[in-house]
Protein backbone atom coordinates (compact mmCIF):
# COMPACT_ATOMS: atom_id res chain seq x y z
CA UNK A 1 0.00 0.00 0.00
CA UNK A 2 1.02 3.56 -0.52
CA UNK A 3 2.70 5.13 2.50
CA UNK A 4 1.42 8.65 2.31
CA UNK A 5 2.13 11.36 4.86
CA UNK A 6 -0.97 10.58 6.91
CA UNK A 7 -0.13 6.92 7.22
CA UNK A 8 3.46 7.73 8.22
CA UNK A 9 2.19 10.11 10.89
CA UNK A 10 -0.17 7.43 12.14
CA UNK A 11 2.63 4.85 12.23
CA UNK A 12 4.63 7.23 14.39
CA UNK A 13 1.67 7.47 16.75
CA UNK A 14 1.60 3.66 16.98
CA UNK A 15 5.19 3.66 18.22
CA UNK A 16 4.30 6.27 20.84
CA UNK A 17 1.22 4.40 22.09
CA UNK A 18 0.77 1.36 24.27
CA UNK A 19 -0.38 -1.45 22.03
CA UNK A 20 -2.72 -3.84 23.80
CA UNK A 21 -2.10 -7.51 23.18
CA UNK A 22 -4.75 -9.00 20.97
CA UNK A 23 -5.51 -12.11 22.97
CA UNK A 24 -8.80 -13.78 23.63
CA UNK A 25 -8.60 -13.61 27.36
CA UNK A 26 -9.17 -16.19 29.98
CA UNK A 27 -12.07 -18.35 31.06
CA UNK A 28 -13.14 -18.33 34.68
CA UNK A 29 -15.29 -21.27 35.75
CA UNK A 30 -17.42 -20.43 38.77
CA UNK A 31 -19.24 -23.77 38.87
CA UNK A 32 -20.32 -26.54 36.48
CA UNK A 33 -22.96 -24.29 34.89
CA UNK A 34 -21.30 -20.90 35.08
CA UNK A 35 -18.40 -19.57 33.07
CA UNK A 36 -17.04 -16.12 32.27
CA UNK A 37 -14.67 -15.44 29.41
CA UNK A 38 -12.89 -12.33 28.25
CA UNK A 39 -10.14 -9.96 29.26
CA UNK A 40 -10.29 -9.27 33.00
CA UNK A 41 -8.66 -5.91 32.58
CA UNK A 42 -9.73 -2.27 32.19
CA UNK A 43 -11.57 -1.97 28.86
CA UNK A 44 -12.34 -5.71 28.76
CA UNK A 45 -15.61 -7.22 27.51
CA UNK A 46 -16.72 -10.28 29.46
CA UNK A 47 -19.22 -12.76 28.08
CA UNK A 48 -20.80 -15.23 30.46
CA UNK A 49 -23.08 -18.24 30.60
CA UNK A 50 -25.06 -19.62 33.50
CA UNK A 51 -28.29 -21.54 34.09
CA UNK A 52 -31.36 -20.04 32.41
CA UNK A 53 -33.46 -17.77 34.64
CA UNK A 54 -30.60 -16.99 37.02
CA UNK A 55 -30.31 -13.57 38.63
CA UNK A 56 -26.97 -11.94 37.82
CA UNK A 57 -25.54 -8.83 39.45
CA UNK A 58 -22.23 -7.03 39.05
CA UNK A 59 -21.29 -4.77 41.97
CA UNK A 60 -24.95 -4.85 42.97
CA UNK A 61 -26.26 -3.87 39.55
CA UNK A 62 -28.60 -6.30 37.76
CA UNK A 63 -27.36 -7.76 34.49
CA UNK A 64 -30.04 -9.00 32.13
CA UNK A 65 -29.54 -12.51 30.74
CA UNK A 66 -30.73 -14.10 27.52
CA UNK A 67 -33.37 -16.88 27.72
CA UNK A 68 -30.38 -19.31 27.63
CA UNK A 69 -28.64 -17.64 30.57
CA UNK A 70 -26.02 -15.78 28.54
CA UNK A 71 -24.95 -12.26 29.39
CA UNK A 72 -22.27 -9.60 28.90
CA UNK A 73 -20.65 -6.80 30.86
CA UNK A 74 -17.48 -4.79 30.68
CA UNK A 75 -14.88 -2.89 32.64
CA UNK A 76 -14.32 0.83 32.02
CA UNK A 77 -11.01 2.63 31.43
CA UNK A 78 -10.52 3.51 35.10
CA UNK A 79 -12.58 0.79 36.75
CA UNK A 80 -11.63 -0.43 40.25
CA UNK A 81 -9.23 -3.35 40.66
CA UNK A 82 -11.94 -5.70 41.83
CA UNK A 83 -15.53 -6.27 40.86
CA UNK A 84 -18.02 -8.56 42.54
CA UNK A 85 -20.29 -10.83 40.54
CA UNK A 86 -23.21 -12.62 42.19
CA UNK A 87 -25.32 -15.26 40.47
CA UNK A 88 -28.45 -16.84 41.93
CA UNK A 89 -29.81 -19.81 40.00
CA UNK A 90 -33.59 -20.35 39.85
CA UNK A 91 -33.29 -22.93 42.63
CA UNK A 92 -30.20 -22.91 44.77
CA UNK A 93 -28.06 -20.53 46.65
CA UNK A 94 -26.23 -17.45 45.51
CA UNK A 95 -22.77 -17.84 44.05
CA UNK A 96 -20.55 -14.83 44.63
CA UNK A 97 -17.08 -14.20 43.27
CA UNK A 98 -14.62 -11.32 43.36
CA UNK A 99 -13.11 -10.67 39.94
CA UNK A 100 -9.63 -9.19 39.74
CA UNK A 101 -9.49 -6.46 37.12
CA UNK A 102 -5.96 -5.80 35.92
CA UNK A 103 -5.09 -2.11 35.71
CA UNK A 104 -3.51 -0.68 32.57
CA UNK A 105 -1.12 2.14 31.85
CA UNK A 106 -2.29 4.73 29.35
CA UNK A 107 0.11 6.90 27.44
CA UNK A 108 -0.07 10.56 26.58
CA UNK A 109 -0.59 11.13 22.89
CA UNK A 110 0.16 14.48 21.30
CA UNK A 111 -1.97 15.20 18.27
CA UNK A 112 -1.32 18.32 16.28
CA UNK A 113 -3.00 19.55 13.15
CA UNK A 114 -6.66 18.94 14.02
CA UNK A 115 -9.01 21.80 13.06
CA UNK A 116 -8.66 24.34 15.89
CA UNK A 117 -12.44 24.91 15.95
CA UNK A 118 -12.82 21.29 17.12
CA UNK A 119 -10.38 21.85 20.01
CA UNK A 120 -12.02 25.04 21.31
CA UNK A 121 -15.44 25.17 19.66
CA UNK A 122 -17.08 28.58 19.19
CA UNK A 123 -20.03 29.33 21.51
CA UNK A 124 -22.40 29.24 18.55
CA UNK A 125 -22.01 25.46 18.18
CA UNK A 126 -22.33 24.47 21.86
CA UNK A 127 -26.06 23.81 21.45
CA UNK A 128 -25.42 21.58 18.46
CA UNK A 129 -22.71 19.64 20.33
CA UNK A 130 -25.03 19.12 23.31
CA UNK A 131 -27.80 17.81 21.09
CA UNK A 132 -25.45 15.42 19.30
CA UNK A 133 -24.07 14.14 22.60
CA UNK A 134 -27.64 13.39 23.73
CA UNK A 135 -28.34 11.43 20.53
CA UNK A 136 -25.23 9.30 21.08
CA UNK A 137 -26.05 8.70 24.76
CA UNK A 138 -29.62 7.68 23.90
CA UNK A 139 -28.47 5.20 21.24
CA UNK A 140 -26.03 3.61 23.72
CA UNK A 141 -28.85 3.05 26.22
CA UNK A 142 -30.43 0.56 23.81
CA UNK A 143 -31.08 -2.70 25.64
CA UNK A 144 -32.39 -5.09 22.98
CA UNK A 145 -32.78 -8.86 23.01
CA UNK A 146 -30.34 -9.37 20.12
CA UNK A 147 -27.66 -11.94 20.94
CA UNK A 148 -25.11 -10.77 18.38
CA UNK A 149 -22.75 -9.78 21.21
CA UNK A 150 -22.04 -13.52 21.52
CA UNK A 151 -20.70 -13.70 17.92
CA UNK A 152 -17.06 -13.62 16.93
CA UNK A 153 -16.52 -10.03 15.82
CA UNK A 154 -14.89 -9.38 12.46
CA UNK A 155 -12.68 -6.45 11.48
CA UNK A 156 -14.72 -3.64 9.87
CA UNK A 157 -11.78 -3.02 7.55
CA UNK A 158 -8.12 -3.92 7.23
CA UNK A 159 -5.43 -1.30 7.79
CA UNK A 160 -2.71 -0.08 10.12
CA UNK A 161 -3.75 0.58 13.73
CA UNK A 162 -2.92 4.21 14.39
CA UNK A 163 -4.61 4.99 17.68
CA UNK A 164 -5.47 2.95 20.74
CA UNK A 165 -8.00 2.87 23.56
CA UNK A 166 -7.40 4.89 26.67
CA UNK A 167 -4.65 7.25 25.58
CA UNK A 168 -4.89 10.74 27.05
CA UNK A 169 -4.91 13.14 24.12
CA UNK A 170 -3.41 16.58 23.77
CA UNK A 171 -4.89 18.29 20.73
CA UNK A 172 -2.89 21.20 19.31
CA UNK A 173 -1.37 21.58 22.79
CA UNK A 174 -4.67 21.43 24.75
CA UNK A 175 -5.18 18.36 27.03
CA UNK A 176 -8.54 16.70 26.34
CA UNK A 177 -10.48 13.64 27.42
CA UNK A 178 -9.01 10.19 26.76
CA UNK A 179 -9.41 8.56 23.38
CA UNK A 180 -11.69 5.52 23.53
CA UNK A 181 -11.47 4.28 19.98
CA UNK A 182 -9.32 1.91 18.06
CA UNK A 183 -8.14 3.85 15.00
CA UNK A 184 -7.57 2.07 11.71
CA UNK A 185 -6.06 4.19 8.92
CA UNK A 186 -7.50 3.86 5.41
CA UNK A 187 -8.08 6.20 2.46
CA UNK A 188 -11.28 8.26 2.30
CA UNK A 189 -14.04 6.17 0.74
CA UNK A 190 -12.78 2.77 1.97
CA UNK A 191 -15.73 0.49 2.70
CA UNK A 192 -16.49 -0.24 6.34
CA UNK A 193 -18.32 -3.44 7.29
CA UNK A 194 -20.53 -4.51 10.18
CA UNK A 195 -18.53 -6.42 12.85
CA UNK A 196 -21.47 -8.78 13.61
CA UNK A 197 -25.11 -8.86 12.60
CA UNK A 198 -26.38 -5.52 13.94
CA UNK A 199 -29.34 -3.17 14.09
CA UNK A 200 -28.58 0.49 13.39
CA UNK A 201 -29.49 2.76 16.32
CA UNK A 202 -27.89 6.01 15.16
CA UNK A 203 -26.95 7.21 11.68
CA UNK A 204 -25.72 10.78 11.35
CA UNK A 205 -23.87 12.20 8.34
CA UNK A 206 -21.86 14.87 10.14
CA UNK A 207 -21.58 15.47 13.88
CA UNK A 208 -19.41 18.33 15.10
CA UNK A 209 -16.65 16.30 16.78
CA UNK A 210 -17.18 12.90 15.25
CA UNK A 211 -18.20 13.61 11.63
CA UNK A 212 -20.25 10.81 10.05
CA UNK A 213 -21.35 8.71 13.04
CA UNK A 214 -22.89 5.27 13.16
CA UNK A 215 -24.03 3.29 16.21
CA UNK A 216 -24.86 -0.39 15.89
CA UNK A 217 -26.59 -2.57 18.46
CA UNK A 218 -25.15 -6.04 19.26
CA UNK A 219 -27.75 -6.66 21.98
CA UNK A 220 -27.94 -6.48 25.80
CA UNK A 221 -26.27 -3.07 25.94
CA UNK A 222 -23.26 -3.90 23.77
CA UNK A 223 -22.85 -1.45 20.88
CA UNK A 224 -20.27 -0.47 18.29
CA UNK A 225 -19.71 3.12 17.22
CA UNK A 226 -17.90 4.19 14.04
CA UNK A 227 -16.88 7.84 13.74
CA UNK A 228 -15.20 10.34 11.37
CA UNK A 229 -17.05 8.61 8.51
CA UNK A 230 -17.22 10.30 5.14
CA UNK A 231 -20.56 8.70 4.37
CA UNK A 232 -23.10 6.65 6.33
CA UNK A 233 -24.86 4.19 4.00
CA UNK A 234 -27.55 2.83 6.33
CA UNK A 235 -30.39 4.26 8.39
CA UNK A 236 -31.79 3.86 11.89
CA UNK A 237 -33.71 0.58 12.25
CA UNK A 238 -31.86 -1.22 9.43
CA UNK A 239 -30.91 -4.80 10.23
CA UNK A 240 -27.49 -5.50 8.76
CA UNK A 241 -25.67 -8.81 8.29
CA UNK A 242 -22.12 -9.30 9.52
CA UNK A 243 -19.66 -8.16 6.86
CA UNK A 244 -22.14 -6.00 4.95
CA UNK A 245 -21.00 -2.49 4.01
CA UNK A 246 -22.41 0.21 6.29
CA UNK A 247 -20.24 3.29 5.69
CA UNK A 248 -17.19 4.84 4.05
CA UNK A 249 -14.03 6.00 5.81
CA UNK A 250 -13.55 9.73 6.18
CA UNK A 251 -11.77 12.38 8.18
CA UNK A 252 -14.69 14.50 9.33
CA UNK A 253 -14.83 16.19 12.75
CA UNK A 254 -11.84 16.29 15.10
CA UNK A 255 -9.52 14.18 12.99
CA UNK A 256 -6.03 14.57 11.53
CA UNK A 257 -6.45 12.24 8.59
CA UNK A 258 -8.69 9.53 7.13
CA UNK A 259 -9.28 6.62 9.47
CA UNK A 260 -12.02 4.57 11.05
CA UNK A 261 -12.42 5.14 14.78
CA UNK A 262 -14.18 2.10 16.26
CA UNK A 263 -15.60 2.16 19.76
CA UNK A 264 -17.37 -0.55 21.73
CA UNK A 265 -19.65 0.19 24.67
CA UNK A 266 -21.51 -1.71 27.36
CA UNK A 267 -24.20 0.96 27.77
CA UNK A 268 -22.20 4.03 28.92
CA UNK A 269 -19.07 2.01 29.77
CA UNK A 270 -16.34 2.28 27.17
CA UNK A 271 -14.59 -0.94 26.19
CA UNK A 272 -11.51 -1.65 24.10
CA UNK A 273 -12.24 -3.25 20.70
CA UNK A 274 -8.63 -4.48 20.47
CA UNK A 275 -9.22 -6.82 23.42
CA UNK A 276 -11.86 -8.86 21.59
CA UNK A 277 -10.23 -8.93 18.17
CA UNK A 278 -7.58 -11.25 16.75
CA UNK A 279 -4.45 -9.62 15.32
CA UNK A 280 -5.11 -7.36 12.35
CA UNK A 281 -4.53 -9.38 9.15
CA UNK A 282 -1.76 -8.19 6.83
CA UNK A 283 -3.19 -5.85 4.20
CA UNK A 284 -3.37 -7.26 0.67
CA UNK A 285 -0.85 -5.69 -1.70
CA UNK A 286 -2.42 -3.85 -4.60
ZN1 LIG B 1 -9.81 8.02 16.94
Image: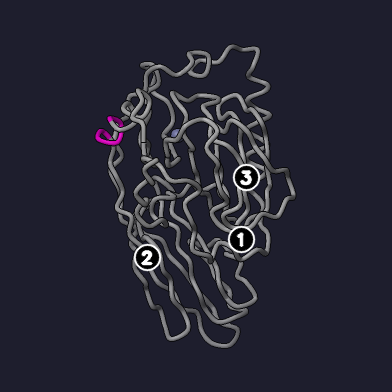
User: Where on the picture, by quarter, is residue 51?
Assistant: bottom right
Left-right relation of 258 to 218: left
Range of magenta residues: 12-16
Q: Given the current orientation, which residue lies at the most extreme front position? A: 286
Work out which quarter of the rendered image holds the C terminus and state it: top left
Task: Say few, some or many: other residues with alpha carbon within 10 Å of mark 2 (under 14 / 14 to 19 / 20 or more).
Answer: some
Q: How far apart are marks 3 and 1 (CA)?
A: 21 Å
- Main SS of the magenta part reads helix
Image quadrant for the N terminus?
A: top left
| Residue 247 against residue 98 in the figure, above or below | above
Up/down of 212 relative to 41, above or below: above
Q: Where is residue 49 in the image (x, y as percent from the top left)?
A: 51, 75
Residue 246 - label: 3
Cα gap from disc 1 to disc 2, whole angstroms:
21 Å
The residue lying at 66 percent from left, 35 percent from top is 134
What residue is shown with label 1?
Answer: 220
x, y percent for residue 223: 58, 51
Amino acid sequence: MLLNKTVLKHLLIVVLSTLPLAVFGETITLNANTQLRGEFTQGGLIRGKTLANSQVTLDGKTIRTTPNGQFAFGFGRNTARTSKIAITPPSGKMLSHTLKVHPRNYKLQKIDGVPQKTVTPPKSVLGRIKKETQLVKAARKTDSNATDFLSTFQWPLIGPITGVYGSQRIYNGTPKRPHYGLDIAAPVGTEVRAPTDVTITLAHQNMYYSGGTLIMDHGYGISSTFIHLDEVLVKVGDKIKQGDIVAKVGSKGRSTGPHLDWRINWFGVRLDPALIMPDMPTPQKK
